[in-house]
Image: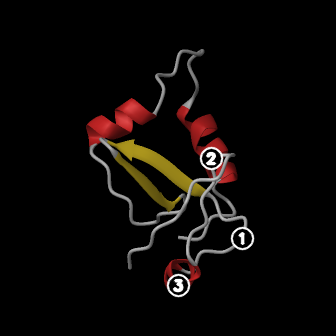
Amino acid sequence: MTSIVKLSSKGQIVIPKDIRDALELREGEAMRVRRSGQQIILESAVMADEKISYTEFRQRVPKYSGPPVAADDMNSNIDRLFAGWKV
């Protein structure tokens, strides 16, 4: 599917309906925008199957500079943070 869209004065574009329908995009859905050379990549921010290298993971996650934390405390915090996630 290829379409021509125009950039508004506010920097907005409209994703054509056939593409929104095919990708099951809904109003208010979070999107990730990134640049790759002269291309703009727009993708769903919820990508369950995204695979990244360990190097890229380390680049995305900031280095921890706080006080030492016990493993049990980390695990309980992780459990709390991910309690509502569907796997």
Q: Nearer the viewer, residue 42 or 3?
A: 3
Mark 1, other Cα within 10 Å: few <14 / some 14–19 / many ≥20: few
Q: Nearer the viewer, residue 56 or 13?
A: 13
Q: Mark 1 or mark 3: which comes first in sequence?
A: 3
Residue 11 numbered mark, or none: 2
Q: Is residue 40 above or below residue 1?
A: above
Q: Mark 2 or mark 3: which comes first in sequence?
A: 2
Q: Residue at x 47, y 57 (%)?
A: 42
Mark 2, other Cα within 10 Å: few <14 / some 14–19 / many ≥20: few
Look at discs 1 and 3 and give the one toward the viewer.
Answer: 3
Q: Is residue 17 above or below residue 80?
A: below
The picture quadrant where one finds residue 51 is bottom left
Residue identifier under label 3: 18
Alpha carbons under labels 1 and 2: distance apart: 18 Å
Label 1 secondary element: loop
Label 3 secondary element: helix
